[in-house]
Each structure stands twice: as structure tokens, then as C-alpha cells.
Amino acid sequence: MSPLKRNKLSKIRTQLDKLDNSLIKLIKKRTNLVKKVLALKEKKNQIVDQKRIKFILKNIRKKSLENNIDPKITQRIWKNMILSYIDFEKRNFKSK
């Protein structure tokens, strides 16, 4: 790789690192909201809401297409995020 390309790559990676830091802050905000939702759930079987999951994924697909983003990327990200938060809720559920 030429020095010019190496320099460009370094700058792009710096931008990606900054974006990752922003994403971490958003994930923290999302986690705090999920904690509030979890506090309202009375039974463990309320954690997984298939209707809500389908709605979210359909909406993400639509927004991805509108924004010219490959929907396979966003669908995979959101499915994994949803599964991660389901796991989080199950681990943190407290019977009432």
C-alpha cells in the first residue's frame, strides 16, 4: 500500500473510531431504556414479544431502503441487538 493510501486509511479509521464511541453512548442510552421496560414486566414470558420484534425489523428494513443502506446489514445488526437485549432482560429479570 502506498504512503498516500496508508494515510487515507488511517484517517478513515480515526473517523470509524469516533463513530464507534458515539455508538457506545447510544447503546448505553438504549440499555437504560430497556432497564425501564424490564422494570414494568411482571412475568418472564413477557420478555419476548414476537409481534414487536417483527414490527421493529420491518421498520428497520423500510428505513434502510429509504436511506440506501443494504437491508441485510441492518437486519443482521438489529436481530443480534434484539437477541442480546432479550438475553440481558432474562439475566436481569426479577420476579414480582
Image (spheres, rainbow, N blue to C red):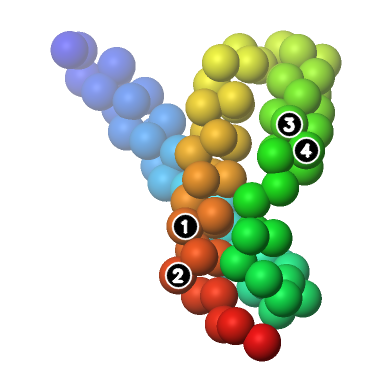
Q: Kindly identify the amino acid type of the residue bearing the numbered disc 4.
A: Lys
Pointer 3: what residue? 54
Residue beneath label 4, please? 51
Residue type pointed to by label 3: Lys
In the rendered view, tell whether residue 44 sits above or below residue 3.
Answer: below
Where is residue 45 shown, x and y percent of the image?
63, 60
Q: Which residue is mark 2?
A: 91
Residue 90 rendering spot, x and y as whole percentages? 50, 65
Residue 38: image quadrant is bottom right
Question: Do the residues bearing badges 2 and 1 touch, measured as CB atoms within 8 Å?
Answer: yes
Q: Nearer the viewer, residue 96 or 16?
A: 96
Image quarter (top left, top right, bottom left or bottom right) of the N terminus: top left
Spatial CA span between label 2 and label 1: 6 Å
Quadrant in which the C terminus appears = bottom right
Cα–Cα span, label 2 and label 3: 23 Å
Residue lying farthest to the bottom in this orientation: 96
Are there few (<14), some (14-19), or many (20+) residues within 10 Å of tag 3? few
Q: Which mark is residue 87?
A: 1
Residue 13 position (above or below residue 63): below
x 29%, y 16%: residue: 5
Instruction: Of the two numbered discs 1 and 3 on the same chain, state the one appearing first in sequence.
Output: 3
